[in-house]
Image: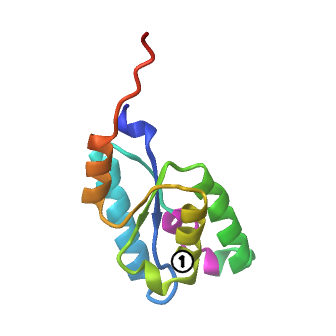
Amino acid sequence: MNKRKILVYVAGKYSGEISGNIHAARETAIKLWESGFSVFCPHLNTIHFEKDCKCRYNDYIMGDLEILERCDVILMLDNWESSQGATREHEFAQSQQIPIFYKIEDLERWYNEKPTVCNQP
């Protein structure tokens, strides 16, 4: 399977040190794109919307869960446990049986060990 067909959702803390958290998520997204995966990074999708958009927090969470449901895997950033939103994303991924990874290396290993499907008789 082509790596680009794997859609990775990057989950981690946004609030608090917003600029630093966005930067960390962005750096991870760049590494994943350069590694060959397709990536959705909610930090970049709604960057600084807390100032620019009239939506409420729950609007973003519900939208993010809709997007996560369409992803193949989720990668949790180091600070995810201190984030209410990332914790909800983690729980949702578990409930939907979406594979969860905590390190890019583990995602790479999973991809490399994933059996290929052969439809030939």
For residue 5, side relative to residue 34 (left or right) = right
Task: Residue at 52% x, 55% y: name it.
Answer: 98
Coordinates of residue 64 in the picture (x, y in percent): 62, 63
Q: Quadrant of the C terminus?
A: top left
Q: Is residue 113 magenta?
A: no
Residue 16, compared with residue 57, is above or below; it is below
* Residue 117 x %, y %: 41, 26
Q: Which residues are magenta?
A: 42-50
Corner quadrant of residue 89: bottom right
Name the colour scheme.
rainbow
Q: Which is the main secondary structure of the residues drawn in magenta? A: helix
- Along the horizontal axis of the image, is 24 left or right of 60? left
Q: What amino acid is found at the position of numbered circle 1 in the picture?
A: Thr
Quadrant of the image occupied by residue 29: bottom left
Q: Residue furthest top?
A: 121
Residue drawn 50% across and 79% down? 14
Name, please, the residue furthest toward the front.
Answer: 121
Q: How many marks?
A: 1
The residue closer to the viewer here, 60 or 82, is: 82
**Mark 1 highlights which residue?**
87
Q: Nearer the viewer, residue 2 or 33?
A: 2
Q: Is residue 58 left or right of residue 93?
A: right
State which quarter of the image contains the N terminus: top left
Q: Residue at x 38, y 72 (%)?
A: 77
Percent position (x, y) of residue 81? 45, 82
Please rate how many residues cluster around mark 1, counting C-alpha atoms within 10 Å: few if below 14, some from 14 to 19, many from 20. Answer: some
Question: Vertically, is 6 above or below 99?
Answer: above
**Which residue does the image show at 28% across and 58% down from the upper left?**
106
Q: Secondary structure at mark 1?
A: helix
